[in-house]
């Protein structure tokens, strides 16, 4: 399966840039930096957005990455009936975590096997007598809280708060144009399957397909010669007359 690069917006239009197979967000930013095409903001799908990527993008390229940050997968967050990590107060200066009932953590560790996360432990006697224990932890041990380093923790919290803002949602809604271009590239032009062997030939196929999409979109915007649906060819008329099915052409969108 071939993986194509993402389109980008320029001047209010979505076009396909030079493609690479395969490609990731960090590679895209590095390549655009060499070509002096770095945007001020870059809209990303949630599947590409990691916790550290927005920080690295701002630090290395001065590009703000905008995308949905995944919510915590803990059972307390899924059911909305327990105390999740956001309900705890983290004091990075004092290296302590305070629970919703006012108890402070007993241990603060940064275990190498859980890097870059920090782990705060509460003492068993703090949790055993707590009336809200069923909403906090299901195990027999005391509650533990895992969190990122301070700069990543604050950036993650800010991103999650921004996602609830209507202005952020309007901004991210513009990504639908990008998704439409990707859908046209993969579905309309069958770009998920390569007609050739090897990455180099597949890359050429992607480039030519991207050029075709750009030409089609530019042609559709002109009012001098409005586009009319193309009629069936002589061979297709022969297939219809013979009661035979057409081959799966990309213009049919199948």
Image: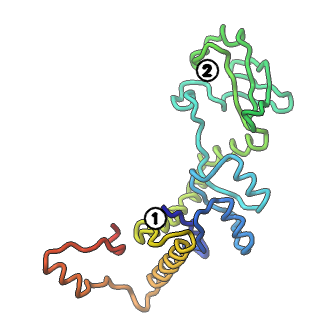
Q: Check residue 192 in the rendering and tell me which mark sits there, or answer none.
A: 1
Marks 2/1: CA distance? 46 Å
Q: Nearer the viewer, mark 2 or mark 1?
A: 1
- In the displayed structure, 229 sits above or below 57; it is below
Nearer-N-terminus badge (2/1): 2
Residue 98 in picture, x, y percent from top left: 75, 23
Q: Nearer the viewer, residue 29 or 133?
A: 29
What residue sits 27% from the left and 84% below the top?
Answer: 231
Residue 50 in picture, x, y percent from top left: 65, 48
Q: Nearer the viewer, residue 69 or 98?
A: 69
- In the displayed structure, 234 sits above or below 1; it is below
View extreme (bottom): residue: 224
Q: Nearer the viewer, residue 3 or 29?
A: 3
Q: Secondary structure at mark 1?
A: loop
Q: Is residue 189 left or right of residue 175?
A: left
Residue 40 in picture, x, y percent from top left: 71, 65
Query: Which quarter of the figure has residue 149?
Result: top right
Residue under pointer 2 = 136
Query: Which quarter of the figure has residue 91?
Result: top right
The mark total stands at 2
What residue sits 49% from the left and 68% below the top?
Answer: 181
- In the displayed structure, 41 sits above or below 72; it is below
Q: Is residue 152 left or right of residue 81?
A: right
What residue sits 57% from the left and 27% below the top?
Answer: 76
View extreme (right): residue: 93
Query: Callout 1 environment at 10 Å: few (<14), some (14 to 19), or many (20+)?
Result: some
Query: Callout 2 environment at 10 Å: few (<14), some (14 to 19), or many (20+)?
Result: many
């Amino acid at each position: 399966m071939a993986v194509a690069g993402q389109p980008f917006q320029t001047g209010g239009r979505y076009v396909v840039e030079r493609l690479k197979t395969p490609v990731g967000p960090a590679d895209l930013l590095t390549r655009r930096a060499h070509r002096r095409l770095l945007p001020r903001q870059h809209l990303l799908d949630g599947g590409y957005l990691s916790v550290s990527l927005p920080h690295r993008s701002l630090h290395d390229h001065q590009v703000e990455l905008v995308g949905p940050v995944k919510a915590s997968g803990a059972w307390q967050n899924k059911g909305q009936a327990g105390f999740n990590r956001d309900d705890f107060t983290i004091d990075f200066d004092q290296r302590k975590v305070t629970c919703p009932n006012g108890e402070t953590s007993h241990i603060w560790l940064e275990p190498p096997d859980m890097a870059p996360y920090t782990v705060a432990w509460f003492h068993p006697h703090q949790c055993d007598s707590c009336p809200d224990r069923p909403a906090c932890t299901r195990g027999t041990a005391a509650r533990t809280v895992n969190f990122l380093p301070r700069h990543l923790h604050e950036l993650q919290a800010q991103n999650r708060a921004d996602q609830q803002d209507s202005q952020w949602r309007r901004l991210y809604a513009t990504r639908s144009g990008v998704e439409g271009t990707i859908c046209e590239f993969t579905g309309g032009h069958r770009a998920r399957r390569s007609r050739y062997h090897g990455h180099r030939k597949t890359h050429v196929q992607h480039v030519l397909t991207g050029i075709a999409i750009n030409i089609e979109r530019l042609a559709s915007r002109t009012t001098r010669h409005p586009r009319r649906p193309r009629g069936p060819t002589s061979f297709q008329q022969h297939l219809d007359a013979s009661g035979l099915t057409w081959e799966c052409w990309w213009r049919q969108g199948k």
